[in-house]
């Protein structure tokens, strides 16, 4: 195991490279999911009275 | 005017040709530039100062400066042209002239080409003329200096053309000047490489013709394509 | 089947969700397999030692950086040609992912270059072109943030992406020209070590993993963008409260 981590003496280079990839992948995934969740919450809180007239009409007068 | 002459005048087909549009826009912008003389001087002064800064920041050693020279003179030309680009369309945009130009029956790309030509005549051309004189600060021989002038004459129009697209895209945007630089500089890399490369080739005793031919090719492609892109960007900005 | 119905943000939203989930699953499986091949199964390289293992992430990142820009340019062309909102939203969603891929290509390339060629940054043609590609991505993202009106931003960024796409081959050619004039010999990160089949397989699997990952992330981002920009539409509130 320690042999694997040592990467034949190139540990710094290999793990800095793979580490950056891991950080970016995790960060981007989280950021995107947080953004989607926030958008969903914001959409939930949209004031129905502020919607454009057509949407409001349909909401207040369901077919 | 007699009725006959009036009718003849009204029936004469109006020439909405690109050529007329180009010359009209060119003449107008040159007239405006001449009336607001201050701006021209500031740009050239900026160029001189930037070129003089590099030896101060490094070392006034002849061999070092000779190596840096072409690159510095080119990068400074790039920065100087960026300085004047925001003003290319901003003035007309502010007083509504740009909208009138977009609505007119004259082809917008032709009008834009005229403005770009005026911009080059007032910024790129003076830099191309001044650079060989400043090249003396970088211990460049006569032939490299001549090549530098030729390369700048071919390359600075391309900078104006590409810059026009950036200026049109960032019309009326806050922080437009720096954003314009960010957008335009990567696109200008080929001009920089071929332009500075021409001078270095001559200094190494090689012919500069491949570099200059490539610059000419860039100029042709840019001259044909960018007016349309800039016109499209103006219409996007005006909507 | 009328595929054009998915040009509507309302019908594309659930589809994007399904594809994103499937892609994410595929990305995880492929990444595990690829990393197993790359880090464990593949033998040590004769000349570069263990450091060569960085290619299993460097090459996929480079390819994705270029491929994502190409896809972004295609969506931009569609947005300008058909004036569709969703095409522009797709281009908007792809830009950050592409920029991050370009950044990773540069970062991993630097850490590969140091042990193998002695320097973190060797001004070789491919790395320099990738750097300029990163600048192009950042320019599109900056323009998006700078322009207030979303539809104007859509069209401006689309035009900028296309101008960049046309310029990229010219830039790449000029940088290669510049590089051959100045470097003369050897230093080239594009000459990979002679590859055993195992190494090639590992690289291919990781490339597909990267592709699946980019699809998953950008489709999820486009879902967020759709909800943000279509907030006034009735279906958005229903979907959000569901």
Image (tube, rainbow, N blue to C red):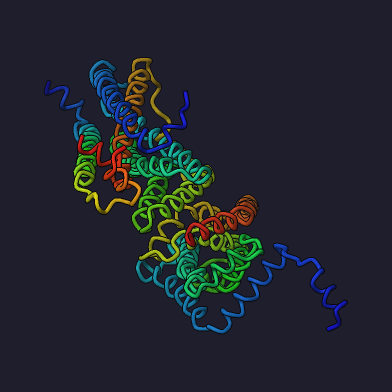
Q: Where residue C235 appears, x then y in whole percent? A: 30, 39
Q: Where residue B144 appears, x then y in whole percent? A: 58, 63
Above or below B30: residue C67? above
Give the quadrant of residue C10.
Answer: top left
Residue B205 visible in this rendered orientation of the protein: no
C165 and C34: which one is in front? C165
Above or below C35: residue B130? below
Q: Quadrant of the C terminus of chain C?
A: top left
Q: Residue at x 52, y 60 (%)?
A: B234
Q: Residue furthest left?
A: A2
Residue C165 visible in this rendered orientation of the protein: yes
Q: Residue at x 48, y 63 (%)?
A: B167
C89 and C24: which one is in front? C89
C222 and C202: which one is in front? C222
Above or below C50: residue B232? below
Q: Where residue C76 appears, x then y in whole percent? A: 46, 43
Give the quadrant of residue C194.
Answer: top left
Q: Where residue B195 appears, x then y in whole percent? A: 55, 57
In the picture, measured across the screen, residue A60 lies left or right of residue C88, that is left
Q: Residue at x 55, y 72 (%)?
A: B97
Q: Residue at x 57, y 66 (%)?
A: B141
In the picture, measured across the screen, residue A29 lies left or right of residue B15, that is left
């Amino acid at each position: 195991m320690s042999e694997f981590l040592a990467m034949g003496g190139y540990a710094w280079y290999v793990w800095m490279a793979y580490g950056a990839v891991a950080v970016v992948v995790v960060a981007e995934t989280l950021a995107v999911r947080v953004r989607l969740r926030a958008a969903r919450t914001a959409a939930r809180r949209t004031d129905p009275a502020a919607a454009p007239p057509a949407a409001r009409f349909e909401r207040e007068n369901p077919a | 005017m007699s009725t006959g002459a009036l009718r003849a005048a009204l029936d004469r087909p109006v020439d909405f040709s690109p050529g007329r549009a180009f010359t009209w826009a060119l003449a107008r912008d040159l007239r405006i530039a001449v009336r607001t003389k201050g701006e021209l001087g500031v740009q050239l002064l900026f160029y001189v100062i930037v070129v003089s800064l590099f030896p101060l920041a490094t070392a006034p050693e002849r061999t070092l400066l000779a190596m840096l020279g072409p690159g510095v003179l080119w990068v400074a030309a790039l920065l100087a042209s960026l300085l004047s680009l925001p003003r290319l369309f901003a003035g007309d945009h502010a007083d509504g002239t740009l909208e009138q130009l977009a609505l007119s029956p004259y082809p917008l790309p032709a009008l834009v080409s005229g403005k770009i030509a005026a911009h080059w005549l007032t910024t790129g051309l003076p830099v191309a003329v001044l650079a060989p004189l400043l090249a003396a600060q970088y211990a460049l021989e006569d032939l490299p200096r001549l090549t530098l002038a030729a390369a700048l004459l071919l390359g600075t129009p391309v900078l104006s053309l590409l810059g026009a697209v950036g200026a049109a895209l960032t019309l009326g945007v806050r922080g437009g000047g720096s954003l314009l630089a960010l957008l335009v500089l990567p696109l200008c890399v080929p001009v920089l490489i071929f332009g500075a490369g021409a001078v270095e080739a001559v200094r190494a005793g090689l012919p500069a013709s491949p570099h200059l031919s490539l610059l000419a090719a860039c100029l042709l492609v840019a001259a044909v394509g960018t007016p349309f892109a800039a016109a499209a960007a103006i219409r996007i900005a005006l909507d | 089947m009328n595929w054009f119905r998915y040009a509507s943000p309302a019908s594309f939203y659930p589809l994007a969700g399904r594809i994103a989930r499937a892609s994410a699953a595929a990305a995880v499986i492929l990444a595990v397999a690829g990393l197993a091949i790359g880090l464990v199964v593949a033998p040590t390289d004769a000349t570069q030692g263990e450091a060569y293992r960085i290619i299993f992430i460097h090459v996929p990142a480079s390819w994705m950086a270029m491929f994502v820009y190409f896809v972004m340019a295609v969506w931009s062309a569609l947005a300008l040609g058909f004036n569709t909102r969703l095409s522009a939203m797709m281009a908007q969603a792809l830009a950050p992912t592409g920029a991050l891929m370009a950044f990773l290509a540069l970062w991993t390339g630097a850490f590969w270059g140091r042990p193998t060629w002695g320097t973190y940054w060797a001004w070789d043609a491919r790395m320099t072109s990738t750097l300029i590609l990163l600048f192009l991505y950042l320019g599109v993202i900056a323009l998006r943030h700078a322009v207030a009106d979303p539809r104007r931003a859509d069209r401006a960024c689309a035009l900028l992406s296309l101008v960049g796409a046309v310029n990229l081959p010219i830039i790449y050619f000029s940088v290669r020209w510049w590089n051959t004039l100045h470097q003369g010999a050897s230093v080239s990160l594009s000459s990979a070590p002679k590859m055993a089949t195992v190494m090639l397989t590992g690289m291919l699997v990781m490339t597909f993993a990267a592709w699946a990952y980019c699809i998953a992330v950008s489709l999820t981002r486009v879902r967020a963008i759709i909800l943000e920009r279509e907030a006034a539409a009735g279906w958005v509130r229903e979907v959000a409260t569901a």
